[in-house]
Image (cartoon, rainbow, N blue to C red):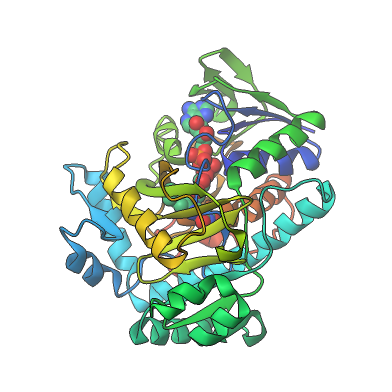
Amino acid sequence: MSRVIVIGGGIVGVTSAWALLNDGHEVTLLEAEQNIAGQTSFANGGQIAVSDSAPWAAPSVPFKVMRWLGRKDAPFRLRPRLDTAQWRWLYLFLLNCRGQALSAGTERNLHLATYSLSCLQQTRSKLGNDFSYDDSQAGIVRLIGNQKEADAAREYFAKHHQDEKIIWMEPSELAAKDTAFEPAVKRNLIAGAVMGVTDESGDARIFATKLATEFENRGGEIRTNCRVTDFISQNGYVQGVTTEQGDISADRVVLSSGVASKALAKKIGITIPVLPIKGYSVTVPIIDESRVPISSCTDLKHRLVISRLGMRLRVAGFAEIGSDKACDAGRAAAARDRLEALFPDAADYQSFDNWMGFRPMTPDGAPIIGEAETLRNLWFNTGHGTLGWTLSHGTAQLLTDMMAGRKTALDMKPYKIKRSYVSGIFG
Ligand SMILES: Cc1cc2nc3c(=O)[nH]c(=O)nc-3n(C[C@H](O)[C@H](O)[C@H](O)COP(=O)(O)OP(=O)(O)OC[C@H]3O[C@@H](n4cnc5c(N)ncnc54)[C@H](O)[C@@H]3O)c2cc1C
């Protein structure tokens, strides 16, 4: 048994701490803020999106970004900065937009997301029925707005999925299956739909907070308001960390601090291409359950994800590079308006909670998992980008298996710290 420190109490840090505790380690989780899951894991879209886990970089993206320039409701927004890290990231992202890289990245993410879902299911069965987090196992429906989106979806699903996990629906079939879609179908807002039946959804913050409590009940330690400022090392091995509450020693340390991982990695001379990409969510209270979709959905036209979380309905989306921490009310209102257009009278749309968070994103859309070459026994599990809630359960187990020297369920080459960051090229 070794003493392990996990830095960061978001969904990735909490699931890592849990998996390590279950593997017999003595684990301390350090969180800079007062609460667990108070940053990017606080109010995300809620989707466990296995069937649609492709990286964002795709051949069509550069053209779309150009077309959207200057538009207020544009799903992507780029604010160029005099920052070489941003330009290098964008260059790598462009390389990932090639068809070959997209294919390799999609296969990679699909394997990881499928594995991650099985790990989540194991955690759930271990914790029993009381362990709920406003979750739903009713799949995710992709709402198709036009013929072009339908063609792209058909190509994607034919290439990457087994038929029995996917259901195609005409608008009338969708409305018959779930009457909540009737108003949108009547107004011709939906041209078709495709459902990933094994997909799930749930509140990542509630999950992380409850899992953190289980972790403590089973002997794990959590220290909040405990920001890590540096690593303590001797002879090339990590010995612990320096924090605002003093030094804490450990045999091993795991870096899982979301967008802050980059600055901490810099302390040991490692540069990781993790860029903070801003997104928004709006949560509204449900007033008529019959008008709320049973499954989570993705509105492909506006790149918005919509999840029912208990008696709340949440819409999330947008991607902004180079933005500050301001929560642009116009962006949030655009998302809310679309939600209301799709599901009128389902919720009290005047009583909303706006939120923004930064996705810790790598250019190839894959997380970073492995041991630091420059400081042994320091491990990374970070950079989960758009899919942290979907992938965290699996990456926690992969990290734990690697630390134990066991064979991992997946090939770990695509996740190495030192890699090309172009999907399919390991370097
Ligand atoms: C709008 C939006 C919608 C999204 N929707 C989805 C979705 O539907 N499905 C999905 O799978 N993913 C989604 N994501 C992505 C997902 O939310 C993230 O990938 C995930 O939350 C990242 O988790 P994390 O633990 O790495 O980071 P965080 O949740 O940010 O956790 C990192 C923690 O580390 C702490 N920390 C930082 N520095 C230090 C330090 N020095 N010492 C100690 N602690 C430190 C922070 O305070 C923070 O609590 C979405 C993201 C956004 C923004």
Q: Quadrant of residue 174?
A: bottom right
Q: Is residue 274 left or right of residue 79?
A: right
Q: Quadrant of the C terminus?
A: bottom left
Q: Quadrant of the N terminus?
A: top right
In this view of the protein, which residue sits in the foreground, 406 or 49?
49
In this view of the protein, which residue sits in the foreground, 145 or 361?
145
- The answer to whether residue 416 shows anywhere in this view is no
Outermost residue on the top side: it is 246
Q: In percent of the image, x 76 and y 37: which residue is there?
A: 21
* Image coordinates for residue 108, horizontal then vertical, percent: 54, 68
Q: Is residue 184 above or below residue 278?
A: below
* Image coordinates for residue 121, horizontal then vertical, percent: 75, 58
Q: Quadrant of residue 267?
A: top left
In this view of the protein, which residue sits in the foreground, 114 or 294?
294
Q: In percent of the image, x 54 and y 58: which residue is there?
A: 307
Q: Is residue 344 above or below residue 146?
A: above
Q: Is residue 213 left or right of residue 194?
A: right
- The answer to whether residue 201 shows anywhere in this view is yes
In this view of the protein, which residue sits in the foreground, 408 or 106?
106
Q: Is residue 117 above or below residue 148?
A: above
Q: Is residue 282 left or right of residue 411?
A: left
Q: Is residue 139 left or right of residue 284?
A: right
Q: Is residue 26 above or below residue 141?
A: above
